[in-house]
Amino acid sequence: MSADAPAVDANPGSSVMSAREVTKTYGGTHALRGVSLSIAPGRVTALFGENGAGKSTLMKILAGIETPTSGEVELDGNVVQFISPRQAADHGVVIIHQELSLCPNLSIEDNLFLAREQRGRLGSVDRGTQHEATEQVMQRLEETLDPDRLVGDLRIGQQQLVEIARALLLNARVLIMDEPTSALSMTEVDVLFRVIRELKSQGVAVVYISHHLEESLEIADDVAVLRDGQLVATGTAADVDLGWVVKHMVGRDQDSLFPKRHANLSGVALSVRDLRVADPSNPQRLAVDGIDLDIHAGEIVGVYGLMASGRTELLEAIAGRLPVTSGGITFAGEALDRESVRERIRRGIALVPEDRQRDGLVQTMSVGQNLSLSSLMSFVRRGLVTRSRERGAVEDMITDVTVKTAGESAPIGSLSGGNQQKVVIGKALMTQPKVLLLDEPSRGVDIGAKADIFALMTEQAENGLAVLFTTSEAEEALHIPDRLLILERGRLVADLDPHSIDRGRLMQLADGTSRSRTGDET
């Protein structure tokens, strides 16, 4: 279907739940414009669209979080008006949100049964039943975690699985998954896909939203694309490809998303020699094991690896967030020994962390306050912050990194995920770094925001910055960097031109199928 064709229902022949001519306005803004979408039982409907296309708004309406301005929602052919997510869940409609809604100070079990505790004969909480159910659902997800373990002590991927487990316990008839794999390893994604297929066989209708487009097409039966609040295309997954999805999402071909450039390298900006870093969660294991690398000014170096490959630990050690067990880091010809994070920022090393919500942003601050947080001292004169200079610098950075916002005073929570990520990158750039470290900079953002971030990385390299970024996306690894490093279990197994290999070879090196070491790949 072309983008100009009239929108039609996906899966018109059979549906368990439908949106009928749904419109949603916020003041003068149309988040949805007359969207009709049917969701079929026993099938996965992949919903595509950029941030701001209306995906989350539509799903919130289906799940009882929002109400439509006009139009109707039907369940089993009957019009329903859910007034809360709890009421929707009681009718079998459950949503897994992109941003985790867990209580870190509670156990896994308590999170799974929060506000719906299992009661015994005398009304007390039946801990035994809850404990057993928690073990069973986590085993279904192939995670052998103690139900009494605090959620705050889990890595983010495990927290994501707890969120999914909570939804599974509700026995949904319609399960809406909004970015369920953004923090999962490839192995965990495989487990989730197995569970989704089990749910399909039981007649559960699944709506799947992900910025990982290829992943979505792999699990989907039906597809629908939203753009600017309208349903612009539908089809079956077997009849479409990645190029079709991208073209309808953004109105341009996929190849245009990766910037073209010719690297103009100068001197070495950062050197790492025989670096070893202990795993923070298991100090007996090395997360980084004897890595050597040089990064030049004007160069974009990509680091590709699977979960537990040491990607994050490498960047955090360079930035000073993790202690070095042995080896050395040299910046601008000088050794970095015991310098703090603050001192490394002052000298010109800036890190954009993987988890923007936890480590990159302060949710109670505005867009502008978040942007200037790391560079605030540069605006201090005679002990006071010069607000006019700070505001001017913030406004310039909002323009430079193309943040879509109502203004520097807007709450950070009012921004989409992609624009929040641009704020975190802008905050790093406001420190005027010479080396920019980005840990999974495109995680959880839509394809349009990814293109903006890639273009920004290219621009910074062309301005002379040394850029080191990690990615778990094969397409990014093969298209973005000038040079690609591949890590496997903490060791550097290849340092090569990304254009010299294909996806298959990349996966062989990353998962240990090939045992080539540095120097074997050219």
Image (spheres, rainbow, N blue to C red):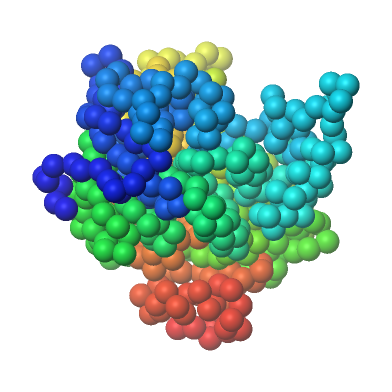
| In this rendering, position of residue 82 left or right of residue 286 | left
Say which residue appears at 43% left-offset and 69% top-offset: 483
Q: Position of residue 3 (x, y in %)?
A: 15, 47
The answer to whether residue 196 is seen in the rendering is no
Q: Position of residue 282 (x, y in %)?
A: 79, 56
Q: Viewer-proximal residue, 99 or 404?
A: 99
Say which residue appears at 75% left-offset and 64% top-offset: 286
| In this rendering, position of residue 274 left or right of residue 221 | right
Say which quarter of the image contains residue 346. top right
Q: Is residue 187 above or below residue 452?
A: below
Say which quarter of the image contains residue 148. top right
Q: Viewer-proximal residue, 381 or 126?
A: 126
Q: Is residue 277 above or below residue 400?
A: below
Say which residue appears at 47% left-offset and 75% top-offset: 506
Q: Position of residue 164 (x, y in %)?
A: 60, 44
Say which residue appears at 65% left-offset and 41% top-offset: 169
